[in-house]
Amino acid sequence: MKIDCLVAEIGSTTTVVNAFNLHQGPVEFIGRGMHQTTVDTDVNIGLSNAIHDLKKNLNVDELIFDEMLASSSAAGGLKITVHGLVYEMTARAAKEAALNAGANIHLITANRIESYHIEKIKEIKPNIIIIAGGTDFGEKEVAFQNLLDLIDLNVPIIYSGNISNHDRIAKLNKDHIRIVENVYPRVDDFNIVPLRKAIYETFEKNIIHAKGMSHIFDMVNHMIIPTPGAVMDATLLLNEIFEGVLTIDVGGATTDVHSVSEPKPEFLKYNDGEPRFKRTVEGDLGVFINRLEVLKTFKHGEIERNTGMTYDHVVHVMKEEPFIPKTDFGKKVVDLLTRQCVFQALDRHIGDMKRVFTTNGFKVIPEGKDVTQVKAIFLTGGALLHASHPQQMVKDYLQKQQTKLIPDPNTRVYVDYDYIFASLGVLSHKYPEQAKELLLKSIRREENH
């Protein structure tokens, strides 16, 4: 059997291979193969086994494909540290760019780096260090000195600060330092895209140094990007169609929320540099690895009322149930956990109307990300795709809010039924129109459910 393209998602525990036809006949998702990730030895073993599983699922003996693309969150994913001048300005802008690229941010510092920061960075062993600081032609010394402090760690560094430092950084003649446009060139101006692109390219260039990844390009012949960044890429593609979108991705370890939207025109003056496209990742919200942490976020008595069982009994059951629960009671609890992850993650991502005191008395003003203009909401991730009535979870959240800057409660909620958002985010870099067509096919399967 001949297939145009395979996209591999190399996760920390599972490797998934999705097959697509892009050029011959209709653009379509063909099938999926899966296998345990073999990052402790060589990820190509797990990748080969996932392709073998794909052949079995397609009932073919031979599979020929023209190219393979990939995303990865294996070997710790994309670990980044961020260092800016002012926390709420340059450091925040660099943090947003890193999150949008799919990073796990392990340290953020503002102003001069201290010796204990350097020791912490050595412990973290990041894939990339980002240095920002100073608007263009403003303060330049802090960012430059921070770079000098970190230059000997031999970790790839991306400098995205004051343009005034470009010449003297270039004269250092260090191969592991990359210079890109300032991520915060003017006050309240987030210039995220150039840094995001540089993070992708640096990640791909250096991924072979991660454990078990040294021979990855023996099989993958084009592009490897961080998996969470690929979901944002799919969200950006959907925004071209719907013009205001939000994606919720509930997994076993984290819950990610991605949004692309402008604020209400009347709220624009309060936007305070809030990025147009934003990703938040909640490391304590997951229905498998972090399920016991999620249970702790319920109000007193809420678990008992919803399950008819004691809290201790529910904890015991959740310790025994696998990622995809085997019992009806386990499924009921995991549905509750998934709903809680949706509620908590949306609460943290979406801004609020705040009551503040001014010289003219109390006023109510918006604070944080305004998603009131979102026209479509998308659900992906294993937990939501296995949940009962996942769209209703989002509807319930929207109906309960009084002051949050939420979309209209009647906003349409779509599900990524083929579970291919991350793969299509990867595809969008090379085949944007085909990826867009496949996205619409996956979400429009909703009509058949």
Image (spheres, grey):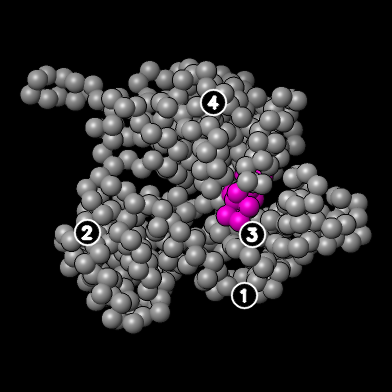
Residue 61 vertical position relative to residue 364 in the rendered view, above or below: below
State if disc 2 and disc 3 touch (CB < 8 Å). Answer: no
> Residue 6 lies in what quarter of the image?
bottom right
**What amino acid is at disc 3?**
Ala
N-terminal of the two: label 1 or label 3?
Answer: 3
Residue 32 position in % (x across, y down): 77, 49
Per the rendering, the mark at residue 136 is 2
Does the CB distance between marks 1 and 4 fall below 8 Å?
A: no
Q: Residues within 10 Å of mark 4 (few under 14, many from 20)?
A: many
Q: What is the three-letter code of the residue carrying label 1?
A: Ser
User: Residue placed farthest to the left in the image?
Assistant: 359
Q: Which quarter of the rendering shows the N terminus? A: bottom right
Using the numbered discs, state the Cα–Cα distance from disc 3 to disc 2 in whole angstroms: 36 Å
User: Residue sitting at 24 percent across and 32 percent down?
Assistant: 269
Q: Does the image show residue 253?
A: no
Judge from the rendering whether residue 449 lies leftward or rightward of residue 391; answer left or right. Answer: right
Distance between mark 1 and mark 3 Cα atoms: 15 Å
* Residues drawn in magenta: 419-432
Which image quadrant for residue 366?
top left
| Residue linked to disc 1 | 214
Q: Name the residue at 24% across, 62% down.
A: 162
Residue at 41% in and 26% down: 372
In contact (CB < 8 Å): disc 2 and disc 1:
no
**Which of the 4 quarters of the picture holds residue 194?**
bottom left
Query: Are the two marked residues, 2 and 4, in contact with CB atoms closer than 8 angstroms?
Result: no
Q: Earlier in the sequence, mark 3 or mark 2?
A: 3
The mark nearer the N terminus, 2 or 1, is 2
